[in-house]
Image: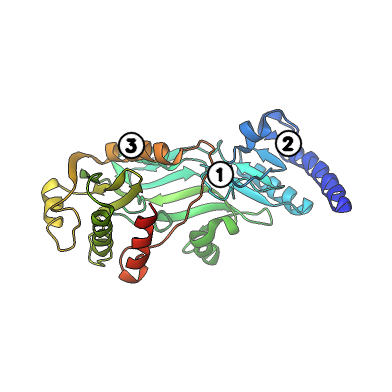
C-alpha cells in the first residue's frame, strides 16, 4: 500500500506541472489540494455522503485549453471530468484523484432569428439558457416533462473534445456515431464545449396547480397516490401535462404544471382516475410560462439545496406512460406505512 501511495503522489506532482502548462501558467485557471479551503471553494462536493478529492480543479477559457487538459489527464493516467452545474448526487463531476474541467467560463449564448437555432456554450446552466431563449425571443426547448422534446433531441450539433484531445463537430450528418453516443451517455465520450439547439415558440398560458393532502388518514393518502400513478400511466396523457408527487411527514402534495389554458386543464381533470377531483385542498394559478419555471427553480432549490453541499440519498424510478413502470401497489402500501 505504501508503494502505491508513493507512486500516486509522484504522478499527481507531474500532473500539476502539466496542468499549469496546459493553462498557460495562469494561476486564476487552476487550483490544487494544498490550497486553503480547497474542498469548500474549489471541489465543492454536492453530496457530502460521498467524499472525493480531485487532484486539480481547472477553469479553462477555450476549447484548445480543454483539449490540452484532456491530453494531460491521458498522459498522467488520471480521470478527467467536465463540470457545469455540479448537481451530481454521486459527485461524478468531482472525481477522486482526477482533473475537474469546470466550464464556468463557457457561458456565451446567441440566437439565429432566421433559423431559430440557438448556440450555447457548455457552461451555461439550464435556468440561464431558458431565460436567454425567452427574453427577448420568446423561444424555448425541452425541460423534461414539458411539451417539447428532451434536451438531447433538441440538439442539432455539438462541438466536443474527445479522449485523444481532438476538437470535433458532431451532428446527424457529421461524426454521426459520436453524436448518437453523446446523446445517450455524453460524459463517457467527450467534453461538449458548444451546443447548437433547435428551439420552439415558448408556451403561452400555463396552469400551475397544487393539491395538498395534509388531513385525513395515511390510508386515504395511499389511495390518492395509487390513483395518481394510474393516471400518469395513461400513454394518451397529453405531453402538455407535467406532475410531481411529494410525500413528507406532513402529508402528500401533487403539483406541477399544465401548458395550456385553465379551461383545458379542467377538462383534463374530469378524466377517470384523476386523483384530485373530490379531495384535497386545491390551488390553481394561471401564469406566464417563464414565471412558472422561475417558481419551480426556487422550489427545487428549497427542497434539494440547489448548489449547496449537503448529505443526500436518492433513488430514481422511471414511471409514466405504462403501468409496467409504476410502483407496485404492495410497495406503495409499505412506503406509506413506513412514513
Residue at image coords 32%, 35%: 135
Residue 336, horizontal then vertical, whole percent: 34, 56
Disc 1 vs disc 3: Cβ atoms closer than 8 Å?
A: no
Around disc 1, counting alpha carbons within 10 Å, would you say few (fewer than 14), some (14 to 19), or many (20 or more)?
some
Disc number for residue 47: 1
Residue 13, horizontal then vertical, whole percent: 82, 41
For the residues labelled 1 and 3, the Cα–Cα distance comes to: 24 Å
**Quadrant in which the N terminus appears:** bottom right
Tell which residue pokes out farthest to the right in this image. Answer: 3
Viewer-side residue, 107 vs 280: 280
- Label 3 or label 2, whichever comes before in sequence order: 2
Around disc 3, counting alpha carbons within 10 Å, would you say few (fewer than 14), some (14 to 19), or many (20 or more)?
few
- Rendered position, 5 above or below 327: above
Which quadrant of the structure image shows residue 226? Answer: bottom left
- Rendered position, 314 above or below 41: below
* Relative horizontal placement of residue 302, taking residue 235 as reference (left or right): right
* Relative horizontal placement of residue 261, taking residue 251 as reference (left or right): left
Amino acid at each position: 500500500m505504501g508503494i502505491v501511495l508513493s507512486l500516486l503522489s509522484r504522478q499527481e506532482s507531474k500532473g500539476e506541472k502539466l496542468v499549469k502548462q496546459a493553462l498557460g501558467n495562469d494561476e486564476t485557471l487552476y487550483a490544487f489540494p494544498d490550497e486553503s479551503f480547497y474542498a469548500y471553494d474549489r471541489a465543492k462536493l454536492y453530496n457530502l455522503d460521498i467524499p472525493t478529492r480531485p487532484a486539480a480543479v481547472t477553469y479553462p477559457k477555450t476549447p484548445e485549453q480543454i483539449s490540452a487538459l484532456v491530453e494531460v489527464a491521458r498522459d498522467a493516467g488520471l480521470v478527467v471530468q467536465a463540470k457545469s452545474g455540479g448537481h451530481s448526487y454521486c459527485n461524478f463531476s468531482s472525481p477522486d484523484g482526477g482533473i475537474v474541467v469546470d466550464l464556468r467560463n463557457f457561458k456565451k449564448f446567441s440566437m439565429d432569428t432566421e433559423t431559430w437555432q440557438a448556440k450555447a456554450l457548455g457552461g451555461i446552466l439550464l435556468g440561464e439558457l431558458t431565460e436567454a431563449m425567452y427574453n427577448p425571443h420568446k423561444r424555448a426547448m425541452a425541460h423534461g416533462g414539458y411539451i417539447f422534446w428532451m434536451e438531447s433531441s433538441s440538439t442539432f450539433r455539438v462541438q466536443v473534445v474527445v479522449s485523444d484531445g481532438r476538437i470535433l463537430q458532431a451532428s446527424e450528418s457529421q461524426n454521426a456515431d459520436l453524436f448518437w453516443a453523446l446523446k445517450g451517455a455524453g460524459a463517457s465520450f467527450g467534453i461538449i464545449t458548444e451546443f447548437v439547439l433547435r428551439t420552439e415558440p415558448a408556451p403561452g398560458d400555463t396552469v400551475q396547480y397544487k393539491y395538498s393532502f395534509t388531513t385525513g388518514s395515511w390510508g386515504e393518502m395511499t389511495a390518492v397516490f395509487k390513483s395518481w400513478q394510474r393516471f400518469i400511466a395513461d400513454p394518451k396523457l397529453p405531453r402538455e401535462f407535467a406532475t410531481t408527487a411529494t410525500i413528507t411527514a406532513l402529508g402528500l402534495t401533487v403539483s406541477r404544471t399544465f401548458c395550456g389554458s385553465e379551461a383545458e386543464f379542467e377538462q383534463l381533470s374530469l378524466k377517470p382516475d384523476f386523483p384530485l377531483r373530490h379531495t384535497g385542498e386545491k390551488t390553481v394559478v394561471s401564469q406566464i410560462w417563464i414565471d412558472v419555471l422561475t417558481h419551480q427553480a426556487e422550489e427545487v432549490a428549497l427542497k434539494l439545496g440547489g448548489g449547496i453541499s449537503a448529505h443526500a440519498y436518492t433513488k430514481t424510478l422511471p414511471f409514466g406512460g405504462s403501468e409496467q413502470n409504476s410502483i407496485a401497489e404492495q410497495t406503495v402500501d409499505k412506503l406509506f406505512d413506513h412514513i
